[in-house]
Amino acid sequence: MNLNETCNIFLADDDEDDTFLFQEALGQIPVKTDLVIAENGMELMKKLGSTEQVPDLIFLDMNMPVKNGMECLHELRRSEMYNETPVVILSTSVAGYLLEDAYNAGANLYIQKPTSFSNLVTILKKCLLKKSNLINRPELSEFLIANE
């Protein structure tokens, strides 16, 4: 990503603490960002529907009320407007079946929610500065970024 471009990011996460930390972590990265936050998948889809701008990157929490991350991912991949948009799944769980489901549904990356702020900054930096790598989906063996 060009450092002079603004990266338009949508985040769907129902945890206020996680969204606050996500915002703070973005502020630590030398990339201009415009962040739109939704509390659940249904709100995300409404916000996406109310703008003509296609986001550069969408982050989806796996477990949300109303419409979860997987339901949202399926809807995004069926949409002509968003089927090419990189989607990153965020979850505390790294269960194998969840990884496979997200991969098969078309997610570009699966991130286990980091346990430290510095890890969150590092992971987001990788996602934003190497966004072109997300467009070409990795193999399943490289799909997960887990806590160390």
Image (tube, rainbow, N blue to C red):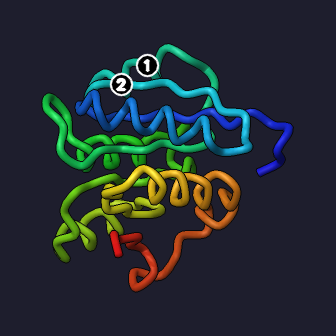
Residue reaching furthest to the bottom: 141
Q: Residue at x 41, y 42 (%)?
A: 76
Q: Amino acid at mark 2?
A: Ala
Front residue of 90 and 26: 26
Q: Are marks 2 and 1 in contact (CB under 8 Å)?
A: yes
Which residue sits at x=31%, y=48%? Answer: 74
Q: Residues within 10 Å of mark 1 (few under 14, many from 20)?
A: some
Pick the front one: 64 or 80: 64
Q: Is residue 57 above or below residue 32?
A: below
User: What's the mark number on residue 120?
Assistant: none
Query: Could you tell me which secondary element the residue under label 2 belongs to?
Result: strand
Which of the two labelled residues, at mark 2 and mark 1, occupies the earlier sequence position?
2
Picture quadrant of residue 51? top right
Say which amino acid is labelled 1: Lys
Where is residue 142 shown, x and y percent of the image? 45, 80
Image quarter where the C terminus lies is: bottom left
> Which quadrant of the structure image shows residue 15?
top left
Residue 102 percent coordinates (x, y): 30, 62
- Residue 16, image x and y in percent? 28, 27
Camera-side mark, 2 or 1? 2
Q: Is residue 80 visible?
A: no
Horizontal arrangement in the rendering, residue 134 relative to residue 139 (left or right) = right
Residue drawn at the location 73% of the way across and 44% of the way down: 30
Q: Residue at x 50, y 34 (%)?
A: 24
Residue 124 in sight here: yes
Cα–Cα gap, marks 2 and 1: 8 Å
Element assignment for label 1: helix
Q: Is residue 77 above or below residue 105?
A: above
- Which numbered disc covers residue 38? 2
Residue at the farthest top position: 50
Q: Which residue is mark 1?
A: 47
